[in-house]
C-alpha cells in the first residue's frame, strides 16, 4: 500500500511540474505576442490555457482521491494539501499569461504597448519568464535556494509595476486612453504573476523545511 501511495504522490509532483512548464511557455510566448504584435501566437497562448486547466482539474481529482483512499497524516497530508494549493496558483499564473495574450490579440494589428513603455515591458516579461522558469526548477528539484531567486524576481516585477504607474501619471505621457488602460492592466497582470510564483516558492519551502513564511494575498 505504501508503494502505491508513494507512486501517487510522484504522479502528483509530476503533474505540478508539467503545469509549471506550460505556464513558463505561456508567459514567454504571451510576452512575444504582446511586444511584437504576433496575432497567431497570442491565439495559441489563449488556446493552450485549456491544457493547464485540464491538468489542474485532473490533479485536484487525484489529490481528493488520495485523501479519501489513503487518509494521509502528518507530512504526507501536508504534501497533498500543498499540491492542491500550488496547482491553484499555477492555474492562476496560466490565466494571467492568457490575459496578456488577450490584450495583444485585442489590439492587433496595432501594438498594445506604446513605444515609450516598451522597454519596461520587455524587462517585465523577462522577469516574469525567469520567475516561471525558477518555479519549474523548484518544483522539479525542491532546491529551496531557488525560492529566494523567485522572491527577488517578484521584487523586480513590483518595482516595474510601480514604474508603469509613474509613467502613465507623468504629465509628459502621450499615450491614448486605450494605451493607458492597457499599460495599467498589463502591469497588474505581470505583478500578480510574480506574486503567485512567490506563493508556490513559499509553500515548497514550508514543505521542505517546515519554516512558514507569511503568505501574501493571491487573487
Image: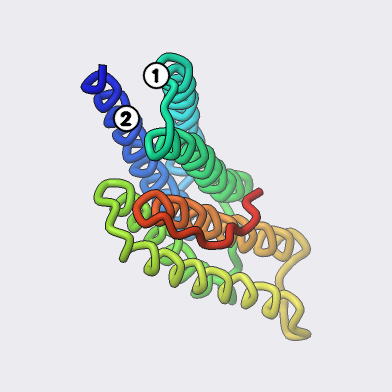
Determine if residue 32 is in view. no
What is the x, y in percent for residue 26? 42, 45
What is the x, y in percent for residue 112? 60, 58
Q: Foreground residue, 202 or 129?
A: 202
**Residue at 69%, 63% in the rendered image:** 184
**To which residue does mark 1 refer?**
70
Cα separation, mark 2 vs mark 1, equals: 11 Å
Task: Decide if residue 163 is on the left or right side of residue 154.
Answer: right
The tally of labels here is 2
190 vs 6: above or below: below
- N-terminal-most mark, 2 or 1: 2
**Residue at 66%, 48% in the rendered image:** 219
**To which residue does mark 2 refer?**
9
Q: Foreground residue, 157 or 4?
A: 4
Which quarter of the figure has residue 191? bottom right
Q: Foreground residue, 129 or 13?
A: 13
Looking at the image, which residue sits at the far front?
74
Kind of element beneath mark 2: helix
> Residue 16, labelled with which disc?
none
Binning the other alpha carbons within 10 Å of mark 2 as few (below 14), some (14 to 19) or many (20 upward) gives some
Kind of element beneath mark 1: helix
Amino acid at each position: 500500500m505504501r508503494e502505491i501511495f508513494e507512486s501517487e504522490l510522484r504522479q502528483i509532483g509530476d503533474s505540478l511540474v508539467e503545469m509549471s512548464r506550460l505556464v513558463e511557455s505561456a508567459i514567454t510566448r504571451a510576452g512575444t505576442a504582446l511586444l511584437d504584435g504576433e496575432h497567431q501566437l497570442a491565439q495559441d497562448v489563449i488556446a493552450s490555457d485549456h491544457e493547464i486547466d485540464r491538468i489542474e482539474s485532473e490533479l485536484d481529482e487525484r489529490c481528493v482521491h488520495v485523501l479519501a483512499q489513503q487518509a494521509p497524516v502528518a507530512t504526507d497530508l501536508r504534501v497533498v494539501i500543498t499540491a492542491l494549493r500550488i496547482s491553484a496558483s499555477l492555474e492562476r499564473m496560466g490565466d494571467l499569461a492568457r490575459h496578456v495574450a488577450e490584450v495583444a490579440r485585442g489590439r492587433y494589428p496595432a501594438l498594445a504597448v506604446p513605444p515609450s513603455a516598451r522597454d519596461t515591458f520587455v524587462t517585465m516579461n523577462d522577469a516574469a519568464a525567469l520567475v516561471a522558469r525558477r518555479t519549474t526548477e523548484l518544483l522539479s528539484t525542491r532546491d529551496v535556494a531557488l525560492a529566494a531567486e523567485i522572491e527577488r524576481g517578484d521584487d523586480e516585477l513590483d518595482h516595474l509595476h510601480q514604474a508603469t504607474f509613474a509613467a502613465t501619471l507623468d504629465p509628459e505621457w502621450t499615450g491614448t486612453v486605450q494605451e493607458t488602460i492597457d499599460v495599467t492592466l498589463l502591469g497588474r497582470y505581470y505583478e500578480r504573476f510574480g506574486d503567485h510564483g512567490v506563493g508556490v516558492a513559499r509553500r515548497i519551502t514550508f514543505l521542505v523545511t517546515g519554516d512558514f513564511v507569511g503568505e501574501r494575498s493571491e487573487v
